[in-house]
Amino acid sequence: METDVLGMAIVIWKGLMVFLSTSTLVLFIKFFLFVYTVVLFLDIVMLLMLRGLSGNLKNMLYGTVRPIISKSKAIVRFENILDRLKSNNPSQYKVAILEADAFAEELFAGMDYKGATMGEKLDNIKDGQIETKEQMTLAHAVRNRIIHDPDFTLSKEEAEQWIGNYRAFFDEMELF
């Protein structure tokens, strides 16, 4: 008596497929696994959000925390600084530098740099964390001269140069 093994395997396979496609038990298991997968996916998303994954990625990429400020607010604030350079009043040039320095100091504070003053915060920046550190140090030195030396004069071209240093820093922080 010969048995057709291949024919028997095909019959069993077809029977199994009919069972899997029509069984209420299999339908229930499929539904349960679908719901379980959705819940598991949502749990993973929630954990990543609660952990602050985007902040961790920025910290890993840049080596420091980046400031959280909307681009539109940053642009408006910097445009107000640039408007001061449009006047022909040297005292407005000084105010523009003071405002740009104050804006930069707020950003450094938001980036968790330690120090009571802008100079201390600049000193606490490690080499390579901020490419424009040297430019910021020079621009801050001009700010200090404005504050401490009442006879300090500043031409429009010099003011534009120092504001350019602040602009380079703001560009590096991706504010614009």
Image (spheres, helix red, strand yellow):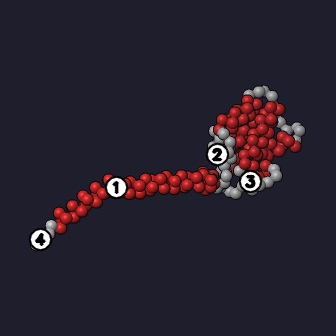
**Residue 83, visible in the rendered structure:** yes
**Which is closer to the viewer, label 3 or label 4?**
4
Identify the residue shown where x is 77% and y is 35%: 96
User: Distance between the Cα atoms at labels 4 and 1?
Assistant: 33 Å
Identify the residue shown where x is 38% and y is 57%: 25
Instruction: Indicate which disc residue 2 carries.
Output: 4
Q: Residue furthest front?
A: 24
Instruction: Indicate which disc residue 113 carries.
Output: 3
**Which is closer to the viewer, label 2 or label 4?**
4
Is the C-beta separation of discs 2 and 1 under 8 Å? no
User: Distance between the Cα atoms at labels 1 and 3?
Assistant: 63 Å
Local packing at callout 4 (Cα closer than 10 Å; few below 14, some 14-19, many 20+) is few
56 and 78: which one is in front? Answer: 56
Say which quadrant the N terminus sits in. Answer: bottom left
Q: Quadrant of residue 150?
A: top right
Instruction: Indicate which disc residue 23 carries.
Output: 1
Residue denoted by label 2: 172
Can you give x and y, in whole percent of width and height, for residue 143 in the image?
80, 42
Relative horizontal placement of residue 165, taking residue 94 as reference (left or right): left
Q: Residue furthest left?
A: 1
Disc 2 marks which amino acid?
Glu
User: Distance between the Cα atoms at labels 3 and 4?
Assistant: 85 Å
Disc 1 marks which amino acid?
Ser
Local packing at callout 3 (Cα closer than 10 Å; few below 14, some 14-19, many 20+) is some
Earlier in the chain: of badge 4 and badge 1, it is 4
Q: Residue furthest right?
A: 150
Say which quadrant the C terminus sits in. Answer: top right
Identify the residue shown where x is 30% and y is 57%: 19
34 and 162: which one is in front? Answer: 34
